[in-house]
Amino acid sequence: MANKHKCKITVLRREYFQDLADEYLADPQAGKCKLFQDGQEIIVDSENYFPMLGGKFCSEAWDSISRYVYAAIQGGSIMRGWTNDEKVMITCCNDGVRPVIFKLERIDG
């Protein structure tokens, strides 16, 4: 029987810290992440969770959020007691100069 839960990943926004880029990046004009777009939505379920990296998702971002996505598609609480809805989490990738901020949302049904 297929798992009935899904996780919607929404790109809330992409940030860029020019002062850090100037000091630390090889290309200080790299700008915001180009792999994602603000407002972009991606639906993950048990069928596409493991092949997610097939060129469709940044491996560093996936490494940062995949455990929470997995919890959501298993029907678990993502952030019980931390957010005002345990089915929702606000998180980001681990790029400190140009982070992408994601909303993860468990979809039941």
Image (spheres, rainbow, N blue to C red):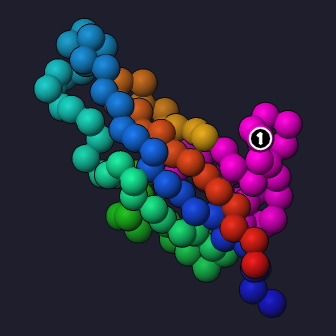
Tell which residue pokes out farthest to the front in this image: 84
| Residue in the image at 20% along x and 13% along y | 22
Q: Is residue 62 magenta?
A: yes
* Above or below, comparing residue 103 to residue 49 in the picture: above
Tell which residue pokes out farthest to the bottom in this image: 1
Disc tally is 1
Residue 45 in the image: state x and y as whole percent: 63, 73
Q: Residues within 10 Å of mark 1 (few under 14, many from 20)?
A: few
Quarter of the figure with residue 24 = top left
| Residue in the image at 51% along x and 45% along y | 102
Q: Quadrant of the N terminus?
A: bottom right
Horizontally, residue 82 falls left or right of residue 21, namely right
Of 39 and 93, which appears nearest the observer?
A: 39
Quarter of the figure with residue 16 = top left
Q: Quadrant of the C terminus?
A: bottom right
Q: Is residue 51 magenta?
A: no
One can see residue 60 in this view: no
Q: Secondary structure at mark 1?
A: loop
One can see residue 82 in this view: yes
* Above or below, comparing residue 100 to residue 24 in the picture: below
Horizontally, residue 30 falls left or right of residue 46, namely left
Quarter of the figure with residue 74 = bottom right
Residue 100 in the image: state x and y as whole percent: 42, 39
| Residue in the image at 39% along x and 58% along y | 40
Q: Which residues are magenta?
A: 60-89
Residue behind mark 1: 84
* Above or below, comparing residue 74 to residue 2 in the picture: above
Residue 80 in the image: state x and y as whole percent: 84, 43
Residue 4 in the image: state x and y as whole percent: 75, 79
Residue flagged by tag 1: what amino acid is it? Answer: Asn
